[in-house]
Image (cartoon, helix red, strand yellow):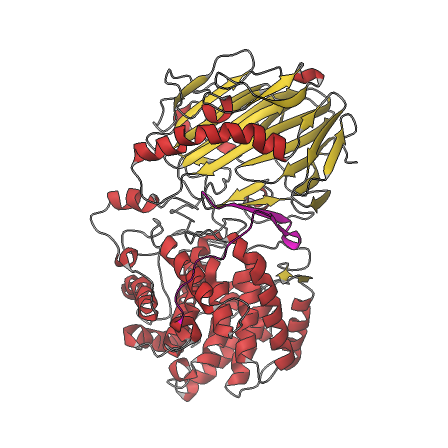
Amino acid sequence: MTANLNQDRYAAGRSDRLPIADNPLRTREDMRQALLQLCEPLLPRYSAGGARLKLGVTGTSYAPDVAEMEGFSRVMWGLVPYWAGGGEPGPIWDIYVRGIANGTDPGHEEYWGEARDYDQRLVEMAVFGFALALVPERIWEPLGERERKNLINWLNGINEHPVYDCNWLFFHVLVNMGLRKIGLPYASEQLEANLRRIDDFYLGDGWYADGVGGHSDYYVPFALHYYGLLYAKLMAAEDPERAARYRERAELFARDFLRWFSADGSALPYGRSLAYRFSQSAFWSALAYAGTDAISPGVLKGLVLRNLRWWFQQPIFDSAGLLTIGYAYPNLIMAEQYNSPGSPYWALKTFLPLALAEDSAFWRAEEEPLPEWNDAPSIQRPAHLVLCREAASDHVAAFNAGHLATNEHAHTSAKYEKFVYSTAFGFSVPKAEWGLGQGAFDSMLALSEAGDNLYRVRRRNEETSIEENVLFARWKPWRDVEARTWIVAGLPWHLRIHCVRTERELDAAEGGFALGLTADTAAHARQAGQAGQAGQAGQAGQAGSEKSGAGDGGSSALTGNEMDRGSSALTGNSTGRAVQMSGEQAGGGVVRTSGRDGGDLPLRSGECYALASGQLGVSGIRGLLGFARAEAIRPHANTNVLHPRTVIPTLQARLPAGEHWLVSAVYGRPTSGTSVDGKAAAAAGMEGRSGEAVGGLSDGHVAAHSLEITAEEIRFATSSGRMIVLPRGEGKRE
């Protein structure tokens, strides 16, 4: 769940409100109107010859003329189903007929150019194959003989050049499927070879990897399954066995993918290509289009339309109504090198239900809510994830074991190796390399050579495993530094345990969830032997900084005089059970619950906490072993995918050469509801929840996980109650 506050902030700076924000998105006609509302601002931006669509001037890894061709093609993912479902051709159809004729004409100044090996043009050809198969009367039959020949010659470029060994193989499949459907010669042997190779990516239980050894991210639903379901629908007669297999795999996958969505329509931000935004729900559209019955039409309809409604309340458009590069707001920092101004229009894949008739099961059905989810974590082993949902706050979190391989995509560590990803708190990417403020290390353990202030995080792992709700990873940020990490998944609390073996002196920083800053956001930090320090984190530049100044995104000790009303979420300042240590923690005292009510939580050696709370919720982290101090870090602006400005409660420690155990409890709970008064929300998020948080600290992460820390071992329980024992000094499981 994410509070829909961005649109209000965005609209406050504009004198108008985009019509799509007021589209109820309940009916087929509403969805048609939404597509037209997205396309209308594009009309004056097509080139004179109609073959290019220029939407901005930011660069990408391919040339500007190819980027403009990409803009042209990506809009077709919405137009093709619109036309297939009987939508009026309108002026945009004239542009596309003219644009296809000119773009494929080698003699025209707007010619799209010859394809090359691994070319972006090969990506954009896929939708033409889809169009030939579904609406030849719109893009094939209106062409003259010479124009048809030019189009086929251009498309055949995909049969003459290799594509990357991943979801790109489906681009070749779709083009040749289209050629076959209109009775033209096609590359049958290569088509079959690519389909067989795609089977090598299948991991079981409905999951693919995006290439052998690749990640399992949104490319599974909005690419591999999406194209597979198009093939299953359009080639059911010609290739019935494979079509049935694609349907079966998609139905298996749907059971897990349901868990990536919140009841309000938001979905989990995870992985690369998040600039494609509402393509998150394209899989559900394809499942409906293919006619599978694994999920009821009403549930599918709700998944698609709620996701679209959620997105159209976010500030993802510029003042002209054009989609921007970014996620929940315009943001180039988190973008990929292949994101051009036209790239976000791949999100129009979600409009596939427009190809379905008004009397189809999908459009006849009443919209149904997200299916109930019991308290058990959803273990999604092929994706290396364990998902949890807290129904009361509509919060979904994906805990991540990590991956054995990595790649060269932008911010791979942030997008694939965080310990947890959240529908409410999102995740952050680094803006630069210097310090905690520029690094924005939420949900990570960041390590730096002592005093160097250049931090490394997990990028790939030596080994990983998942046992119920416990995720394990062994990773090496340097050749002579090894970290073993156990994550005990749960909401609103989860545990993190690290055993770090190092031959060099290190600085360590453990980041909690990144909380979006609003005017009333307050933060509080305290370590053993020190009175609580607090301040209003939402006011730019108010908090001091020991390193670089909060005004420029540094770390902040937040030394203002106003005590945060929500500090009791971690400190025990409201009635509830508190956690105490029996004996000095550094010497291995046992964590036990105490019946003492009220008062500050006793902090022993090695114990500290940091907390931030406000209109958007509460984020906190408590050091139980090995940490020396806590701070509320103010990272640089625009590093988080959901919120332009954030605060990250963070624990820190200096680690001399040797072996060190670090244990923390991490709290995250968003404010439920989408439009509440700021002060009331802050009170609900802080004061109203503080008692729950204290109870969670004792009865939640201690009692539920049976956590015990002694000089000899660390013990905790899995979700089924099975005990895991970590002998201190060995750094391995028993």
Q: Quadrant of residue 189?
A: bottom right
Q: Position of residue 234 (x, y in %)?
A: 53, 79
State the residue at coordinates (30%, 60%).
24
Q: Residue at x 46, y 28 (%)?
A: 691
Which residue is at the far top? Answer: 529
Q: Nearer the viewer, residue 179 or 17?
A: 17
**Which residues lie in the magenta part?**
365-392
Furthest toward the left, the residue is 15
Judge whether residue 385 is colored magenta. Answer: yes
Quarter of the image that includes the C terminus:
top right
Determine the image quadrant of residue 224: bottom right
Q: Is residue 279 above or below residue 170?
A: above
Q: Nearer the viewer, residue 707 or 548?
A: 707
Please state if 11 lies on the left or on the right of 97 as rendered. left
- Nearer the observer, 241 or 330: 241
| 199 relative to 340, above or below | below
